[in-house]
Amino acid sequence: MSSPTTKPFAILVTGGAGYIGSHAVLALLDAGWPVVVLDTLATGFRWAVPDAAAFVQGDVADMEIVGATVARHKIGAILHFAGSLLVGESVGDPLKYYRNNTAASRSLIEAAVAAGVRHFVFSSTAATYGMPERVPVAEDAPTRPINPYGMSKLMTEHILADVAAAHPLNYAALRYFNVAGADPQGRSGQSVKGATHLIHIAVEAATGKRGHVGIYGDDYATPDGTGVRDYIHVSDLADAHVDALEWLIANPRESLTANVGYGRGYSVREVLDVADRVTNRVIERRLEPRRAGDPAILVADNTKILATLPWRPKRDDLAGIVADALAWERALQERGLSR
């Protein structure tokens, strides 16, 4: 990630009042980029947007608002986080996901092209792979989403590829694995009520917000029978977006699809054992039936991003990730900021 210098244009961050988007805003500001946040505040928080960033309340599907914002603030690139992200909800309400994730993204991309924006970083997901046949999973693995959430993201990747072939716009589609933690400086973190991330649930249980943590299946073909996932610190993920943005600017005729993860996994039980040590209490576990569509192991092959970008993980420590999430959860409760 670059050091702060004079930048050629401003960056529009959609969904910048949400969990990952707000951390990307912080990373951009730390790198010296002027930032404008576009967010409906349907799930995000106005207080999560730093004073140093401009704020526009609006929908990415509103091409008039996007066009006016791009022109007014001299936007040269977009980091797109806005959308819906609950896998289970996507199964029950697929039209919401194709509207919020695919159709809205299509409108945003059209507005970007019309306004002459040249660079686009897209918040994609490992859910595009579905049930991978091999792990760690690399970018050339088959993309076979098993839920509308993953499909809605994959469809947007295809839109970007087609638009980049037809217009002077390049893009990076970053496929995340399991995002967790909070800004180490305490400036932002996971704040939405009902979040489904394991580490977030664990720290909520440790601070009394929940009575227990569910373990969904203990008969997987893994060392302890529980599912294994690649957990990445949200601030490392945010840094990857800044590096991807600056790579796009330096390579205007190239685009990038890359996994963002650490390349190693932890089981549910391992995560909870670490959470016990960090929180200094025993978090109650309850065994629940398997959830349909949960792969036994989902771990990133991060060879491509390491070879392409200067990005290197700085916070690859599970105990540190849990500690940052715990500190943020305690701060939320003290300040009464969460929903």
Image (cartoon, grey):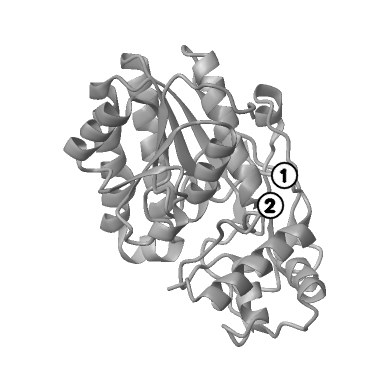
**Circle 1 SS class:** loop
For residue 95, what is the image quadrant? bottom left
Residue at x 36%, y 39% (from the top left corner): 155
The residue wearing badge 2 is 230
Q: Which amino acid does label 2 sit on?
A: Asp
Q: Note whether 250 is above or below 281 in the view shown.
A: above
Q: Position of 66 compared to 120: left or right?
A: left
Q: In the image as oriented, which residue stretches furthest toward the front?
A: 51
**Circle 2 SS class:** loop
Is there a contact, CB below 8 Å, between mark 1 and mark 2? yes
The quarter in which the N terminus is drawn is top right
Q: In the image as oriented, which residue stretches furthest toward the left?
A: 64
Can residue 123 be spotted in the picture?
yes
Q: Position of 221 compared to 43: left or right?
A: right
Position in image of residue 167 (x %, y %): 31, 15
The residue wearing badge 1 is 262
Give the spatial CA distance, label 1 vs label 2.
7 Å
Q: Which of marks 1 and 2 is nearer the N terminus?
A: 2
- Which numbered marker is on residue 189? none
Position in image of residue 63 (x %, y %): 20, 36
The quarter in which the C terminus is drawn is bottom left
